[in-house]
Image: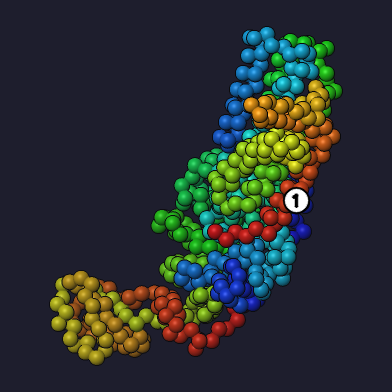
Amino acid sequence: MVRIEVEGLTKRYGFGSTPPSLDNVSFEYEGTGAIGYLGPNGAGKTTTLKLLTGLLRPTAGSARIDGIDVRDHPKRAMANVGAVIETPVPYPTLTVTEAIEMVSQFRGGPDPTLAQEIAYLNDRLDLPPLGERTGRLSKGQRQRVVIAASLIRNPTAIILDEPTTGLDPKERILIRNLLIDLKKDHLILMSSHLMQEVTEVCDQVIFINQGKLLLRDTVENVSARFRSRAVDVEFADPLPADRLSPLGSLVQSVTPLSDRRYRLAFDGLVTTRARILSQCVGIAPVIDYESASLALEDAYLSLMQGTSSNDVPSPPLRN
Amino acid sequence: MDISQLPSDAAQWKTAVSRQWKFYLRTWRFIGLLGFVLLIGLVFTVVSIVQGDSGASGADYLYNAMDSLGTFGVIIGAFIGGDAISMDFGSGTGYFMLVLPVKRIVLLLGRYAAAFMSTLILIVVYVAIALVGALYFWGIGGIPWLDFAQSFLMAALYGLAVLSTAFFFSALFRSPAVSMVVTILVMFLGFEIIDGVVGSSLGYEPWFSLLYAGSAIGLPLEGQPHYTARSVSFGHRTITTYLWYPYVWEGIAIMAAYFVVFLVISAIIYQYKESKG
């Protein structure tokens, strides 16, 4: 069991009246699972993760892992943490194996099971040839090596800063599947721009913007609160828009996406959504009916527009 | 993982040294420097043999070779250590290394030791070639071994001093390329200009200059006057230039001061430098 605590964390770059990049942010989490850390560029996500891993020093507040202050005792605090922040680059002339071995040795000296651990990570992450020098790897290959290195010796906390940015779909799926497995017995804190990824991997989410924490809750609760207010419906055959007139006041707008696919905006209520489907089926055979966007995406957009940042309670994040 | 299973600082230092050394030895930079040192050493030796320029004695022959280390040492140290710290803040290496459960001072000292070992290899190669030339002309009995050993140890200390200075400059910049260029310019041209202006033209002993201290490396083999003055007249004007050599103890003291002071400053900067980029 690992515990991550952030208390009144503030980071101000520069002097004087410069607004803080991170402003009095607090949260804590203990146990296992995955937390998505969401916000637009410049929101303070990476700053938080850097403060949590000792790459930056806080202006005020503290970041603690298992009760150990990261600033005061970085070696002990990071003993059980695997972290991938920004774009890490191993020494370019070391091979894949040597780079991972080095991290292993720093974490715990000689390891008789190291070869098996590397073989497992190789299997899960489809690592490039282990004898290849890391300086010759593509960005995606290097990112997989860096993630493998962060997981060597099985740290209980994993901190990831947009781990799949810049990767191709196959690489994203590999990492997503690994994270889904890892969260069963690890605590993962990951920032991401990809709502689909967060929806699939994370149990909890934290929204942050302009350095301030806006909302923290379970993905389930957030999805319920910010359910989609539009659906996409696709008919089996081309259908003129005027055939949708029976929907009447159920929909607020109808936007054609193709000659047989439409986006229907509505009030967001589940009952309305069900009635729209029922009506559509009565108009013509329906082959697809889905939310126009992810609930998390709607939540993100709403929060970033400041529409509901203060009226949503924030329960403590704790397993 | 139990925190108590973390390796000691000493064990982590050994890991840092071995991995970093492997990194250095495989870089094109090191291979290029090795080629450079081989070329200079061989040219010096072959030209001496072809021209029959054996020097006045074995000590004199070796003095000429060792004296050049003052200049080569700066080039070697600047190239090896010129991006030692900036690489962690400008190239992404820091995002890989600085999130590990290792104290920064341990990483820095490991990197420093690896850089020194790489520098020492290059110095040894150069000195070995010079020694072969000296043995060719003067034989084993013609080599002042104790003086030669002292000169070599001073060259090693000079390597430490140069590296500390290079580490310091590399700590001031974020871009590895910029830090390396600035380090080379400052250490190679900057010291040369200061020595020229302060020492040669103004007549003050440039005791604060690392390059000046480097001119002491050959002195155990062949003593030189502390300074000489030469005056040249142009019509009514007389220009006096000075040539300074440090005392051996003075050269050692200056090198030791550079070694310690700049390493400590580098360590402090590295400890508190943030990964902002």
What residue is at 75 percent from the left and 22 percent from the top? Answer: B63
Q: In the image, what residue occupies the spot 78% across and 15% down?
A: B58
Q: Position of residue B72 (x, y in %)?
A: 66, 30
The quadrant of the picture occupied by the N terminus of chain A is bottom right
Label 1: how many residues lie within 10 Å, few (<14), some (14-19) or many (20+)?
some
Identify the amino acid type marked 1. Answer: Val
* Residue at (26, 89) in percent of width and height: A250
Residue that appears at 21% across and 75% down: A256
For the residue labelled by badge 1, is the local secondary structure a helix, a strand or a loop?
helix
- For disc 1, the marked residue is B264
In the displayed structure image, the side of residue A217 where residue B48 appears, left or right: right
| Quarter of the figure with residue B150 | top right
* A285 left or right, relative to B244: left
Toward which corner of the image does residue B189 lie, by quadrant? top right
Q: In front here: B104 or B76?
A: B76
Report whether residue B275 is seen.
yes
Image mark 1: chain: B
Q: Identify which residue, B227 or A198, lies in the foreground.
A: B227
Expressed as whole percent of the image width and height from the top left, the position of residue B99 reads 63, 57
User: Quick one: which residue is furthest to the bottom in this view?
Assistant: A249
Which percent across, then down, holds residue A80?
67, 61
